[in-house]
Image: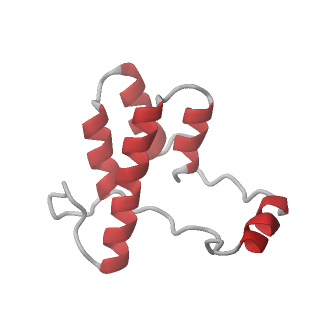
Amino acid sequence: MSNEVEVWLTALKDGSMSLEQVAREFRKHTWAPLRSTPTTTYEQLATAELADPEPYIPGSFDDVTTAYHQGELTDEQYDVLASAMTEALRSSDSGEQPPGSSGSTASS
């Protein structure tokens, strides 16, 4: 089963969308909230490292990370898409429209 994130990554890979077009979609996309609380101490970081990995969530940034680890994205592409996703999360947290958004939040 395909999801929007996979469709955009495929379009980036086959050249039917540019990196900026995909980043624009990432900025408009509604991302699932982070699954765990951020670590703030060395002890928390060590504990989190030893914990079982969290399950894969289709349509999440997990798809981007997987594509990167499979060599389907360059460092630059990964960085741009990670920044776009972060902008979208910050905008949703503050209730603002993300940069590059046309004001509609409809997604298919």
Instruction: Name the image quarter holding residue 93.
Output: bottom left
The answer to whether 25 is drawn above or below residue 91 in the figure is above
Total marks shown come to 0
- Residue shown at 40% from the left, 35% from the top: 77
Residue 100 horizontal/vertical position (percent) = 19, 54
- Residue shown at 61% from the left, 72% from the top: 38
Q: Left or right: where does residue 108 sit relative to residue 38?
A: left
The answer to whether 6 is drawn above or below residue 98 in the figure is above
- Residue shown at 34% from the left, 72% from the top: 92
Colouring convention used in this rendered image of the protein? secondary structure
Which residue of the protein is positioned furthest toward the top in this rendering?
14
Instruction: Name the image quarter holding residue 39.
Output: bottom right
Residue nearest the viewer, comparing 58 with 33: 33
Residue 71 horizontal/vertical position (percent) = 57, 25
Which residue of the protein is positioned furthest toward the bottom in this rendering?
94
Residue 72 seen by the camera? yes
Q: Left or right: where does residue 72 sit relative to residue 53?
A: left
Which residue of the protein is positioned furthest toward the front in this rendering?
42
Quarter holding the N terminus is: top right
The answer to whether 25 is drawn above or below residue 99 in the figure is above
Residue 63 horizontal/vertical position (percent) = 55, 43
Residue 108 seen by the camera? no
Residue 34 horizontal/vertical position (percent) = 56, 67
The answer to whether 101 is drawn above or below residue 2 in the figure is below
- Residue shown at 36% from the left, 69% from the top: 90
